[in-house]
Amino acid sequence: MLVKGLLVNTGPNDFAPMKSLQFARFVGEHWEPFGELMTYEKKK
C-alpha cells in the first residue's frame, strides 16, 4: 500500500525501509487518504 511521494530505501546501517506515512480512513468500500504525507528523518 504505497502512495505517491512515499520513498522506500535501505542501506547497510539503515534497516527501516519506510520513513514516510499518510493516514487514510475507510469510507464505504474504499480507503481515502487524508492530510499531508508525513516524513521522519532520524537525527544523527
Image: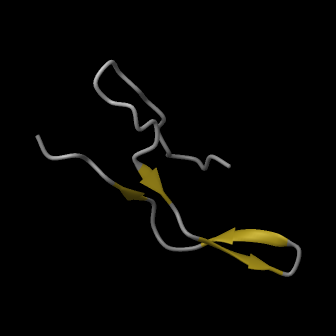
Q: Quadrant of residue 9?
A: top left
Rendered residue at 45%/67% (across/down): 36
For residue 34, above or below residue 3: below
Q: Residue furthest left?
A: 44
Q: Quadrant of residue 34?
A: bottom right
For residue 22, above or below residue 17: below
Rendered residue at 48%/57% (across/down): 21
Rendered residue at 26%/47% (across/down): 41
Indicate left or right for 29 with 1 as reference: right
**Which color scheme does this rendered protein use?**
secondary structure
Quick one: 3 or 42, which is closer to the camera?
42
Rendered residue at 32%/18% (across/down): 12
Which quarter of the rendered picture does the C terminus lie within? top left
For residue 17, above or below residue 2: above
Q: Please give the count of numbered marks on the rendered protein.
A: 0
Q: Residue furthest right?
A: 29
What percent of the width, then of the height, locates residue 18? 46, 43
Quick one: 16 or 19, which is closer to the camera?
16
Indicate left or right for 32 with 42 as reference: right
What percent of the width, then of the height, locates residue 13? 28, 24
Indicate left or right for 19 with 28 as reference: left
For residue 37, above or below residue 14: below
What percent of the width, then of the height, locates residue 27? 78, 80
Q: Residue furthest top?
A: 12
What percent of the width, then of the height, locates residue 42? 22, 46
